[in-house]
Amino acid sequence: MSHLELIDIDLAFGRHEVVRQLSLRLEKGRIGCLLGPSGCGKTTVLRCIAGFEPLAAGEIRLDGVTVSGARTHVPPERRRIGMVFQDYALFPHLTVADNVAFGLSSESAATRRERVGELLGLVGLAEHGGKYPHEMSGGQQQRVALARALAPRPSLLLLDEPFSNLDVELRERLSYEVRDIIKATHTTAVLVTHDQHEAFAVADDIGIMNQGRIQQWDTPYNLYHRPANRFVADFVGQGVFLPGLVLDEHQVEVELGTLSSAIPLECSVGCSECGKSCRVDVLLRPDDIVHDDNSPLKAQVAHKAFRGADILYTLRLASGAKVLSLVPSHHNHCIGERIGIRLDVDHVVAFRNEAVQPAREAVIQFVA
Ligand code: ADP
Ligand code: MG
């Protein structure tokens, strides 16, 4: 039995359908994430889980018990859910320790003190209990908010864009810290964010959301290497599509050569047309194209972005099509220079080329 289950939930504001037939399962102790563009319905899903929005249809179960459904609506305060928001939402007139103690009013003073000490230690703020929120940095305030949400030992922790108010460097560091803290307390959590780096840093399982639906619920590895559709392929990571021609059920040809696979071509809609001569768009990530001075295959440097350890080159092919290549930065080539490249693709992802053969969306996956 999963710890959290959303089964085909629907929600609309008036006529505006915001969440459509959304399902997910999260096992106990795991951190799930809804990742998607602004306005796709992430916060609304969290509010449904917390009990602030009644569902139009579907069901939400926590630990096997229905908390939202056709005939059930357990109020938010009885769901044992902790929440962390983007703006921290600390009580400004309470000290840090009193903020953390806020959800512990039914405990004895001694238990409260002990638990507050434990949590402040866990979030690295043991010495700051007597301060007020305005005396702390943004990152510290967010750790206080996390300690406050975890103090009553919630059954589930919800985090809504918790790092968006922080600068980039701190965001990354804090996201790893927050993951460690959540894991140390064995709490099951759902994070929502529009930032894939945050999602990858914190979550075990990620659902890519678009227009109220989950497009793919998977591990970060599979979202990047085995995107279920074009939206996921575009949203997660970088890459370009090159036109390809399916040669047979094991091979697809692109401008840079023939990509081979060991298992037969597999099409997500199982259509028989996706065979020989099918026109596809092949996804090539920056790590699929390797710079190799000795390769006879050349491409011209059109643009370069220095990233410290690596340079992300945009390379122009003979046809004019462009591809990306991530290269160790000591290979410092000039714009306009022609450099050797080779393909290093171990898993081919291709989508039907709709312009050539308008039809249902199909995904073709090969494994080397
Ligand atoms: P996200 O968190 O992914 O940015 P939201 O869940 O906040 O998206 O919003 C999804 C959509 O629902 C948006 O179009 C938003 O305008 C709309 N929406 C959110 N809350 C309300 C509300 N209380 N009343 C009407 N529309 C709402
Ligand atoms: Mg939101």
Image (tube, rainbow, N blue to C red):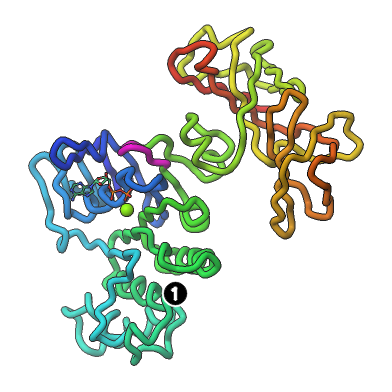
Q: Is residue 5 at least partly visible in the picture?
A: yes
| Image quadrant where residue 28 sits | bottom left
Q: Is residue 63 at least partly visible in the picture?
A: no
Q: Against 198, is 276 above or below?
A: above
Residue 246 picture location, percent across and down: 65, 14
Location of mark 1 (residue): 139
Task: Determine whether, in the image, residue 90 is placed left or right of residue 169.
Answer: left
Task: Determine whether, in the image, residue 145 is placed left or right of residue 325.
Answer: left
Residue 80 picture location, percent across and down: 22, 62
User: Which residues lie in the magenta part?
Assistant: 208-213
Task: Determine whether, in the image, residue 288 is placed left or right of residue 186.
Answer: right
Residue 67 picture location, percent across and down: 17, 50
Which residue is nearer to you in this view: 230 or 313?
Answer: 313
Q: Secondary structure at mark 1?
A: helix
Which residue is nearer to you in this view: 143 or 254?
Answer: 254
Name of the residue lying farthest toward the front: 336
Going by the numbered disc 1, the residue's amino acid type is Gly
Q: Quadrant of the N terminus?
A: top left
Tell me if the residue at label 1 has its CB under 8 Å from ligand 2.
no
Q: Against 281, is 327 above or below?
A: below
| Image quadrant where residue 90 sits | bottom left
User: Badge 1, how many Cα within 10 Å: few under 14, some, many 20+?
Assistant: some
